[in-house]
Amino acid sequence: MLRLMGVCLFCLLAAGAAVPAAQKPPAPPAPALATAGDVTVTATYTGKGVVDATTDILVFLFDHPNPTAESQPLGMQRVTKNGGAVTFKGIAASPVFVAVVYDEKGAYEGQGAPPPGTPYLIYGVTAKTQARPIVPGPKGKVTVRFDGSNRWK
């Protein structure tokens, strides 16, 4: 009987019967396109001075962690009440970085670098840490508190 099975297998192979080949794994899914999301920033200034419509907090959004005088922000909004929040809508860049400036003299319009000596902070930056990236979307909410100890040079 075994001899008969061996002969039958030989006949199938000799006749060119197809032997299933190993299947190729499916192609990986295409990377998801980045979708635009929102970034909400709550800003509080704890240094000297009042935050109001004249001496407000300017909130900037950048696509890089170390903005300079030549950097172009993705957007800028004003907080006119201490502890107020602003929302940048439909931000497609990811990650983004937040910088805040307290306009203590009421003369900075947000064009170019702040005047020397202006209080500012880049979100997440301390003596030991770098700017913190923010991903737009449901988790794109941050609170920034600064006291004026960092001054633009």
Image (cartoon, helix red, strand yellow):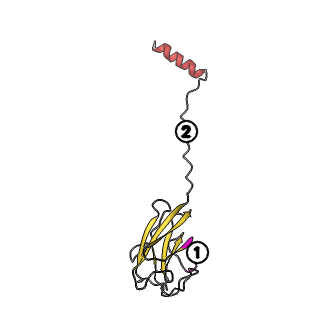
Disc 1 marks which residue? 72
* Residue range (magenta): 69-76
Left or right: 49, with 19 as reference point = left
Look at 53% across and 71% down and name the residue there: 62
Residue farthest toward the top in the current orientation of the protein: 1
Residue 41 in magenta?
A: no
Q: Secondary structure at mark 1?
A: loop
Q: Relative to residue 143, is residue 117 depicted above or below?
A: below
Per the image, label 2 sits on a secondary structure element best described as loop
| Mark 2, residue position | 24
Give neighbour class at mark 2: few <14, some 14-19, many 20+ (Cα, 10 Å): few
Closer to the chain start, of discs 1 and 2, is: 2
Q: Amino acid at mark 2?
A: Lys
| Cα–Cα gap, marks 1 and 2 | 48 Å
The label nearer to you, 1 versus 2, is: 1
**Labels 1 & 2 near each other (Cβ < 8 A):** no
Magenta span includes 74: yes
**Secondary structure mainly formed by the magenta segment:** loop
Give percent across and percent down for residue 89.
Answer: 54, 64
At label 1, which amino acid type do we have? Gln
In the rendering, at what x and y percent does residue 114 appear? Answer: 53, 83
Find residue 106 and name its label.
none
Label 1 environment density (alpha carbons within 10 Å; few <14, some 14–19, many ≥20): some
